[in-house]
């Protein structure tokens, strides 16, 4: 379960970053490119949660996802800011 949920978190964070770039881009082609990447990454994140739901009870999946997201937040608070995706 953890591998699927961690993959979901990674993909969702990538999607968030691509959305930020798309929203900030002034060039229409670049904006469109990053918007497509954002949409694709967001779908990937949800796919991994759906996979997990095929094998484990919903309440277990979402409880573990919350725990992993909280841990990620604690880790990220300690990191220095830098341009990166995943």
Image (cartoon, grey):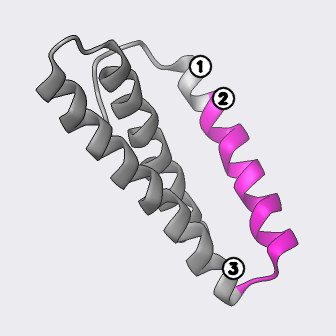
Question: Residue 70, position in %: x, y?
Answer: 72, 39
Determine which residue is flagged by label 3: 53
Q: Quadrant of the N terminus?
A: bottom right
Q: Residues within 10 Å of mark 2 (few under 14, many from 20)?
A: few
Q: Residue at x 71, y 56 (%)?
A: 65
Going from N to C along the chain, the mark reached first, 3 or 1, is 3
Q: Are marks 3 and 2 in contact (CB under 8 Å)?
A: no
Q: Are marks 3 and 1 in contact (CB under 8 Å)?
A: no
Q: Are marks 1 and 2 in contact (CB under 8 Å)?
A: yes
Look at discs 3 and 1 and give the one toward the viewer.
3
Look at discs 3 and 2 and give the one toward the viewer.
3
The span picked out in magenta is 56-74
For the residues labelled 3 and 1, the Cα–Cα distance comes to 29 Å
Please say if 10 is above or below 4.
Answer: above
For the residues labelled 1 and 2, the Cα–Cα distance comes to 5 Å
Question: Residue 33, position in %: x, y?
Answer: 19, 37
Q: Which mark is residue 77?
A: 1
Q: Is residue 86 on the magenta stretch?
A: no
Please say if 78 is above or below 34.
Answer: above
Residue that lies at the very extreme toward the right in this rendered image: 59
Please say if 23 is above or below 50.
Answer: above
For the residues labelled 3 and 2, the Cα–Cα distance comes to 26 Å
Determine which residue is flagged by label 2: 74
Q: Residues within 10 Å of mark 3 (few under 14, many from 20)?
A: some
Q: Quadrant of residue 60?
A: bottom right
Q: Residue at x 49, y 58 (%)?
A: 45
Q: Name the side, left or right, on which 56 lies relative to 49.
A: right
Residue that lies at the very extreme toward the bottom in this rendered image: 55
């Amino acid at each position: 379960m953890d591998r699927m949920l961690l993959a979901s978190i990674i993909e969702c964070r990538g999607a968030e970053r691509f959305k930020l770039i798309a929203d900030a881009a002034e060039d229409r082609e670049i904006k469109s490119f990053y918007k497509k990447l954002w949409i694709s990454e967001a779908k990937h994140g949800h796919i991994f949660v759906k996979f997990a739901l095929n094998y484990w009870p919903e309440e277990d999946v979402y409880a573990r996802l919350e725990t992993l997201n909280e841990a990620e937040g604690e880790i990220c608070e300690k990191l220095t800011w830098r341009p990166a995706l995943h």
